[in-house]
Amino acid sequence: MKDDNRENRPVQRYFRYAVVSFTAFLVLSLGFALIPAEPPPPADPPFSEQARMAALDDALELRTAAGLLSAATAAGGAPDTAGKTAAVDAAVTLLTLQARTLLSPSDSSPLPQQPTALPTTPLPGLAGLASALSASGVQRLADAAKADGGMARLLAGAGTAQLLAAEDVAAAGGIAVETLPHAAAGTPAATPTSSPAGSACPSLPPAPEGPPTPAAPASAGQETTGAGTAAAVAGALSAALAAEQQSVYAYQAALPRLAAKDAGAAGAFLAEHEDLAAEATAHTRAACSAAQAQQPGYVLDPDFLAAPAAGLARLELGSLPAFGDVIALADGGTREWAISALQSAARRAGHWGGDPGPVPGVVLDQDQLPDLPASSATAPTGP
């Protein structure tokens, strides 16, 4: 009996070891299973959203700097501060409206608090503000070339307005525009000579009589590029071409009625419109669409003939949405051409006394824009 017990003891020990090992393994397995796995990092937002957020951040920062500079300039009491303060205040208003336009429902977190007292560090001055505005404008235009749909139009308009504001601030401070490091926003895209990807276009029907049907506008952030939008791109290009052809005729009619001091600029602008009409024709044909022929004449209202400078301003402002449509609907070289044409039209409108607005190319109802959060709505100057 004693021998049997001695023989069973090793077996019992092995059995206990196995039970204990299995229990430990089971406990460890359950413990690892109950520990939640580390969640994967959130995916980066799309490029268009990143560009929008960057534009919003820059607008708010520039708005703060401009507001403080305006307060400091006005407090200086120098006799020549009125013009400088007006230019900076206009920049504050512009940046406020742009920030409200760039806001998104996803921007739920409070925006940075704007200081109401002058900082102890030196302010950038008019030259620094003009340079920062211009640099921001160039970045917006670069992002517009790559963004989606209506967001591209929004960024292109914001960048164009910032470039114009930079020039106004520089002029108020007696600073040469050429000294701005980012004043030149690039050159127009090359005029296409063939259809996209070198493909042959099918036989095109004759151009329809009368003005083309404008393309439906794309809202900000809406995806409108890609397959299936060829007809929309062609319609937007046709509308832009029609606007340029009408501008050529209007400038020809206005030239003999303008004051001598305005004739030189009008002649240069007429040449620009003739070039833009030729480029719009080439882009329309490259999009496999029939280009509208130049109409023999257009009806000019009596107000235009009585005050041609104001009439030319209205004409230039009316072309901005057409180029905005091309930016939103097209891509590649055609979009780059439209971005350049939008800038040119906004400059010409400003020359004749027109106001391109805070986002040229986008028709805004300021009453419908969201208000800035309370933490960022207080500024030294501006709305």
Image (cartoon, rainbow, N blue to C red):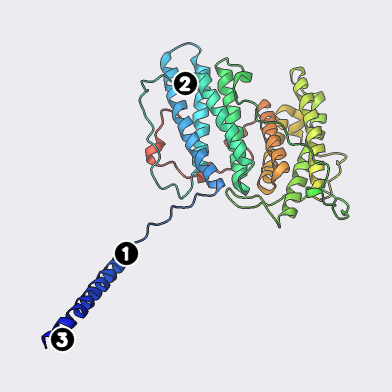
The structure residue drawn at horizontal position 50% and vertical position 32%, both measured from the top left corner, is 93
**Percent position of residue 68, x then y:** 42, 24
**Percent position of residue 26, x then y:** 28, 71
- Reading the chain from its start, which is encountered first: label 2 or label 3? 3
Q: For the residue carrying disc 3, how many other residues have a C-alpha within 10 Å: few (<14), some (14-19), or many (20+)?
A: few
Q: Nearer the viewer, mark 1 or mark 2?
A: 1
Q: For the residue carrying disc 2, how many other residues have a C-alpha within 10 Å: few (<14), some (14-19), or many (20+)?
A: some
The total of numbered circles placed on residues is 3
Residue at the spot of label 3: 4
- Reading the chain from its start, which is encountered first: label 1 or label 2? 1
Q: Mark 1 near mark 2, Cβ–Cβ under 8 Å?
A: no
| Residue 149 versus residue 6 in the image, above or below | above
Tell me the amino acid under the disc marked 3.
Asp
Tell me the amino acid under the disc marked 1.
Phe
Q: For the residue carrying disc 1, how many other residues have a C-alpha within 10 Å: few (<14), some (14-19), or many (20+)?
A: few
Question: In the image, 345: left or right of 38?
Answer: right
Q: Secondary structure at mark 3?
A: helix
| Residue 327 versus residue 61 in the image, above or below | below
Residue 32's disc is 1
The structure residue drawn at horizontal position 80% and vertical position 33%, both measured from the top left corner, is 275
